[in-house]
Amino acid sequence: MDCRTALVEDLMERFPHVPREAVFKEDLLRGGVAFDPSALSDNEGGEVKPKSYFIFSFDHGTLPELGEAALRRPPEEIILTGGPYNLRRTVVSVRVNPSSPYRVAANEDGVLGLYLDGKRIADVGVPPMPEYYRHTLANGKSVMEVAPTIQWGYLIYLTVFRVCQYFGAKEECQYCDINHNWRQHKAAGRPYTGVKDVEEVLEALEIIDRYDTAKASTAYTLTGGAITKTVSGRDEADFYGHYAKAIEERFPGRWIGKVVAQALPRDDVQRFKDYGVQIYHPNYEVWDEYLFKMYCPGKERYVGRDVWHKRILDSAEIFGARNVIPNFVAGVEMAEPFGFKTVDEAIASTTEGLRFFMSQGITPRFTTWCPEPTTPLGKANPQGAPLEYHIRLLEAYRATMDDFGLSSPPGYGPPGPGRAVFSVSSFMDSVSD
């Protein structure tokens, strides 16, 4: 048996309470997947919804290194089902890695499958091109550029500011490629709007609302880079908040409104609430105090870890604890040169953070770290964190939720294996209400 298959099967046997679907999903997210030309899309002119690069690259190579996958984009996500492991429906965000042991390819009948170590392990479904992607704004911009959808159409992802004002080695988060992703798309001549006009966003949402007759899109997220000064004359709360205000005035109650921003002072958080935001994501990135300082130097310099955490707790008084959902980047705990050396240490630290927040009724969520090669941590850790860390994190996450009597957070679609649509980690695949 080939080595990756053996490792995956060993972990499924050792951790039987973690859904086997989540084991494969985490491995694909942490290490990426290769695509045969037969599995690539025809971009916006085809029948498959292509990868939109909605904020980060989430790839294990730069665009020039991806070969044909840079010209004919892979699908936004894939769905795994069946195969020898009898996988339930599992939605996985696509992270391209031409050297991955996992490969998506069509067989002789043209049916897509996922192959591991050369053996077919699952059937692969790809998202159909949504009708709203076939229409453009009056100025010719595509809906995919202005308001792409992910999580199998559940979430409209509005990256309204595509760069970050934490800039350079002394400020950028060491795992984040938002600024490089902006540069590479501009260098490739792709449309990639830096600051999205409010009216363009509203026009794109009008198109989605008109053609999404099944009402598959249920939530929107407003996000982008951190703002330490101003953008278009607005501070961070007002900049992101004024999009929410415009959306809620035009489409009252149509979508669950979410914003991903820094942990801001109470008055700024209140402005988000007043603008109509329903869920606030003040991401804490990594729990350990030393690692936060090393890996989030801009956030440490401008805010500081202790103040960041206090602001998260304060925001629960405004939004309600259930509607404050901070993200952390799962895996950077073990990143060299400063990360934990053992899975035991990393899990203990991350669980401490989970217990800190969950004891207050706040349920964090996480994104599985993709070691993008243009970031300091990606360069130093091309293999990412061990798969065992990710599997044990799912186990610890579920156990901590159970300890505090919490259920899956709102705004993420249905929980549970075979039902979850959240695609950038398996936390929703591993919990149930």
Image (cartoon, grey):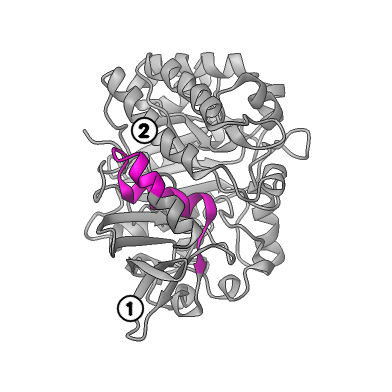
Q: Quadrant of residue 205?
A: bottom left
Kind of residue at disc 2: Glu
Q: Which mark is residue 395?
A: 2
Q: Residues within 10 Å of mark 1 (few under 14, many from 20)?
A: few
Query: What is the tally of numbered marks visible in this picture?
Result: 2
**Residue 324: % across, % down:** 40, 25
Q: Is residue 421 visible?
A: no
In the image, is residue 334 part of the stretch drawn in magenta?
no
Rendered-image quadrant of the C terminus:
top left
Identify the main secondary structure in magenta: helix
What residue is pinned by disc 1? 111
Q: Amino acid at mark 1?
A: Val
Q: Earlier in the sequence, mark 2 or mark 1?
A: 1
Query: Which secondary structure lies at badge 1?
Result: loop
Q: Which residue in the rendered view is the most extreme toward the front?
A: 1
Q: Is residue 17 magenta?
A: yes
